[in-house]
Image: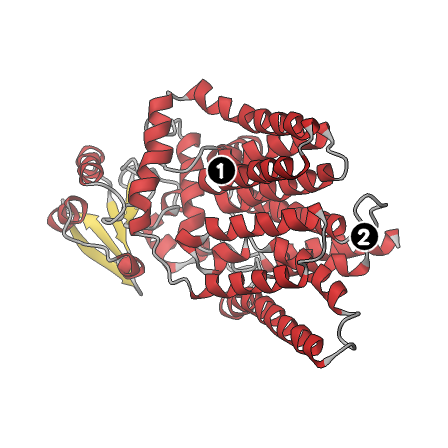
Amino acid sequence: MTNKKYLYWTALFVFLLFFHSNHPLNTDEGVVLSGAWNLINNKELYIDFFEFITPCSFYLIFWAWKIFGAHYFIAKLLAILFIFFSSVGIYKISCQVNSREGGIRKCRLHDYLPPLIFIASSFYWPIISYHTFNIFFIIWAIYFFIKALSNYSRANFILSGLLTGISILFLQNKGIVVLLALSSFLFLLWLKERKLLLLKVSFYYLMSSLLPLTLLLAKWPAKLLYETLIIFPLFNYTETSKTPLNLMAFFFIVLLLTVWILRKEGSKKTYFLIFTQFALLLSAIPLADIYHISLIVFPLYALALLSFEKLKPLTAKNFYNIINTTIFITFFTALIIIVIIPSVEFIYRCPRFYSIANSTVISYIKNNCHDTDYIYAGPFLSGLSFEVRQLNPIPFSFLLTRLHTEKQFSQAEEALKKYQPACAVLNYKMVEKYNYNKNNPVDNYIQDNYKLIFQNGDILIYKRND
């Protein structure tokens, strides 16, 4: 069995490598790549350039580039490893939840299904992303928390807390939701059991989760962090992140069906995973598209396996139980189709081993826009400066009129005047969904001082007037 297990994980890793072998120009990946590129070029995060995401994604790529060189596929391989070991964590969560509480944990054949679904759903994801790195630490924090519930192990609660705290360093909103969810579950458990030991392990969990956050305060002023990482996204981000909640409603229905089937389960591990899945779904409401949802529904995969186990002995008893089983199987099958279909479509549209580095646009920029070290790419073409090995003249990886402030647009205009980039590369089509207003200081400056010299699809390249 051991040889088969290694064969499975090796095949899964090769599978993952092959279907993530392309090099697109993706705006979400571009945010992290441009941040790391700024760090490579001796700019200081939150001081010389603005981001409203916690810092570790930028520094993780920066450190990898420092060691191996600033190449796209170094960052890609790192992200692939994070996805792969996230799938290992999902497998171990499934083993824990689907084993008898207090008994010997034994992984079974069906526990290999959740990591396979997770990886198969990832092929279209922009994986060089703070979401990818963040979810890795969340998955392993949940695993050690579940493991700790068996005997209230102090060591496992501390590990879970440390991983939760690190997850916040990669993406603050989702990490904080997980911290609140796990802390709340411990509090509810204490209300039920009234054990002093639960208060002790709750303290260990909370203190260890806060420990990584001291790294932020050691490097940046608390006021700057508060305004950049909390106030700005809280009051600005919602304007650009409104997404219909149809998909979210479907996943909540599947979760409720799971709760109904497992209502008599009586296991702390099961209740915890249900509680955590509910919290994770809530955290995705601001961006309730299939990408952000498919990242965080891994607890449902493990819970579904347990639900099937409970339904098996019921199906033959009466017609009512047969109907219950049919409904659940239908909904869960639909769930798998929903999370995997985008990957299938992406594989069809984007060939393996494709690279944006060989595209007409990149070639044109390299041949015509290197009069200076700077190039402006907007409104949301983050990462282009890294691809052409130039610097972004403005202190923002992207600029959206319903997200960034008038003051920030004025700062960007001043930066354009100061650094005089040779070219401005624009794509307005991709920001129509954000109701982008082209009547702003940056676009007005470009129209007054640059002329259109090249167009490829929706990409427009403007050259500075001589």
- The amino acid at mark 2 is Cys
Q: Residue at x 70, y 27 (%)?
A: 197
Farthest top residue in view: 218
Q: Which mark is residue 176?
A: 1
Image coords of residue 142 (percent x, y)? 64, 42
Crowding at dot 2, Cα within 10 Å, few <14 / some 14-19 / many 20+, comes out as some
Farthest right residue in view: 1
* Front-lying residue, 6 or 435: 435
Relative to 175, does residue 346 appear above or below in the rendering? below
Relative to 237, does residue 314 appear above or below in the rendering? below
Crowding at dot 1, Cα within 10 Å, few <14 / some 14-19 / many 20+, comes out as some
Q: Residue at x 53, y 34 (%)?
A: 60
Q: Based on the displayed image, in which of its 4 quarters is residue 37 positioned? A: top left
Image coords of residue 118 (percent x, y)? 62, 57
Q: Which mark is residue 107?
A: 2
| SS under mark 1 | helix
- The amino acid at mark 1 is Ile
* Front-lying residue, 44 or 372: 44
Image coords of residue 250 (percent x, y)? 50, 66
**What is the quadrant of the N terminus in the image?**
bottom right
